[in-house]
Every structure is written in structure tokens, then in C-alpha cells.
Amino acid sequence: MGIVLEFEKPIIELENKIEELQKFTSKEEIDLSDEIKKLSDRLEKLRKETFSNLTSWQKVQLSRHPERPYTLDYIGMITEDFTEIHGDRHFADDKALITGLATVEGRRMVIMGHQKGRDMNENLERNFGCAHPEGYRKAMRVMDLAGKFGLPVVTFIDTPGAYPGIQAEERGQAEAIAYNLREMAGLPVPIICFVIGEGGSGGALGIGVGDKVYVLENAYYSVISPEGCAAILWRDRAKAPSAAESLKLTAPELLELGIIDGIIPEPLGGAHRNPERTAKEIKRTILENIDALSPLGKEELLEHRYGKYRSIGFFKEG
């Protein structure tokens, strides 16, 4: 077992105890099957109780789990082929944002998404999934190609936010994101977005304007990170758990508010426990939506997209 979150420790301890008993049984040839079964039943119950009652902050922690599948992992599991496209034709190739052409079940499409690293060196190379302006300009360049050739667009969102450094601001970070918002709103092809981990602020929105937006069960989507919110409101990042509750950033809350279109279920314990199963759910959702949206004419598609975003924020007082 790799990284263990605080609330997972009782589960891991029980798993280790069962494993020890199984090894002892095998080595000493003593039948402890009744004890193992009791512990296994207790483990299953503990897992269900724990992961069915996660707080908002615990879900944020799970969304950041270092073993969680990233964009390239999902691309590898759901596509038959993927040809990466590099560079924004203006400044550089931003490795924090992957773009390219792919085939899924014989359907050609454009796929893009934020990419984090598995170790410190890769995280430095990928800038911890925080894209620069050239990353968003690269994404828009490839989306323009999708519009030109009539290819659906699939995006995977997983970033704490767009990179806020001085150089990124000098190269027009805010303008690059704002341009993407405007252009994606009018892109004449289906756009399906998935928040697979962290969905942080404008960094997420830069590739997040879609006809359909889905959030994985243990991912979050928010205007700001809980730590950032806590630092502003309470001047104390330790208040992040309280901020997470107030931000209404979990998938069920977002669905109830009408901000997203659906929740992608994850295996008990998170997507990293069974990446293939999660990828299968994502793939099924992609194909269903492409089949439903592709027959729509340009005007109908854009009208539907416009209506979707105009309706966010409307509510009735009871």
C-alpha cells in the first residue's frame, strides 16, 4: 500500500491484519478461516461506512491522492490510439496541459487535459498540473482544429488552478483563459468535460466550457481551493476543512445546484483503487454523449450550450 490518508488508517490496519492471518494460516497450516471471514466482513462494513460519509475536506484530500489516475492514464485506458499535439505556435509547449487526436471505439475526437507528475522531477516538469498561458493557447489551437474538422472535444480537468506566477501574468494568463471561455462557448462541435481530480478556479474553466460537464465521485470543482478561501476569509489556511464545507464543491452538491450534468461513480476507496473500472465509466459516458450530441445541428448545439450556462444561478425561494 502506498500513500495512506488519515481517515483511511483504520481500514489499512484491518487490511494488514487480515493479510497477516492469511500468511500465518498458509505457513502454519492452521485453519483460521472463521476469524478471517469475520474480519473481512468487518472490513467491508468499515469501508462502506467510511467512504459513504466522507466530509467535503476528506473528498478534497482524496481528489489529490498521488496514486489517483491522471489524464494520460485515462487516455491510455480508453483510447485505441493517441497522437499528442505540442505547442501553442507563439511561445512554447506547456507540459502541464496535454492535447491530441484520439480514437475511441472507432470514433475520432480531440482529447486534452491537465497532467500532474508522479514524482518531484515529473511534477516540476508538469508544473504540478498548473498550466501557463501557452497551455491554454495550445488547447484552443487544437480545439479550433476540432471545429474545423468536425471532431468532438473531450477534456479532463485536474488542476489546483492556473499558474499564478509573474511570467505567466506577463504572457497574458487571464486573457488566455478568458479567450478560451468565449471561443469554447461558440465551438461548433460537442464538448464533454470531466473533472477527474481537482477542479480549481479559472485553471479548470480554461478547458471546462462544455455541453456536458461531469465530476468524478471523489473530485471537486470550485471557484477557489479550500486553503485559498481560508487564507482570504480567516487569514488561516488551517481553516480549510470549514472552507471546503462552505464552498459546496463536492459532486453531489454541484449536481444539486445544477452546475454539473452528472457524477461518474468511483470504486469504494477512490479511483486509484480500480482505475480500469473508473476509465470504463468515463468511456461509456463519452460515447453516450457523442452519440446523443453529434446529430444536433450547429445552431441547436450552441443554443443548448447557451441555455445550459444561462440557467446556472437561477433558483426559487420557497
Image (cartoon, grey):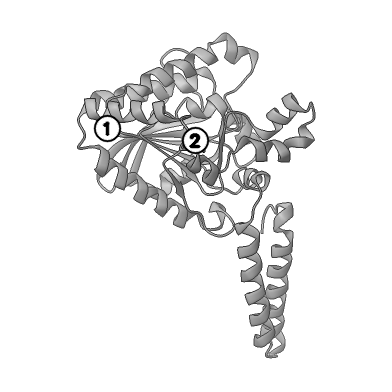
Q: Which residue is mark 1?
A: 151
Q: Quadrant of residue 118?
A: top right
Q: Is residue 291 left or right of residue 308?
A: left
Judged from the image, the secondary structure of the residue bearing numbered disc 2 is: strand
Looking at the image, which residue sits at the far front?
A: 318
**Residue located at (69% from left, 87% from top):** 32
Q: Is residue 105 left or right of residue 18?
A: left
Name the spot of residue 316 as percent of width and height, x first.
48, 34
Q: Quadrant of residue 132?
A: top right
Identify which residue, 117 or 290, lies in the foreground: 290
Q: Amino acid at mark 2?
A: Ile
**Residue located at (36% from left, 48% from top):** 285
Q: Quadrant of residue 4?
A: bottom right
**Residue located at (48% from left, 45% from top):** 73
Q: Which mark is residue 286?
A: none
Name the spot of residue 288 as percent of width and height, x first.
30, 47
Q: Which mark is residue 157?
A: 2
For the question of whether residue 107 can be seen, the reply is no
Identify which residue, 300 or 102, lies in the foreground: 300
Above or below, 247 against 202 in this view is below
**Residue located at (26% from left, 30% from top):** 301
* Residues at discs 2 and 1 in contact (Cβ within 8 Å): no
Q: Quadrant of the N terminus?
A: bottom right
Looking at the image, which residue sits at the far top?
A: 170
Q: Amino acid at mark 1?
A: Leu
Identify which residue, 14 or 225, lies in the foreground: 225
Name the spot of residue 246 as percent of width and height, x first.
66, 37
The residue carrying pointer 2 sits among few (fewer than 14), some (14 to 19) or many (20 or more) residues within 10 Å by Cα, namely many
Q: Earlier in the sequence, mark 2 or mark 1?
A: 1
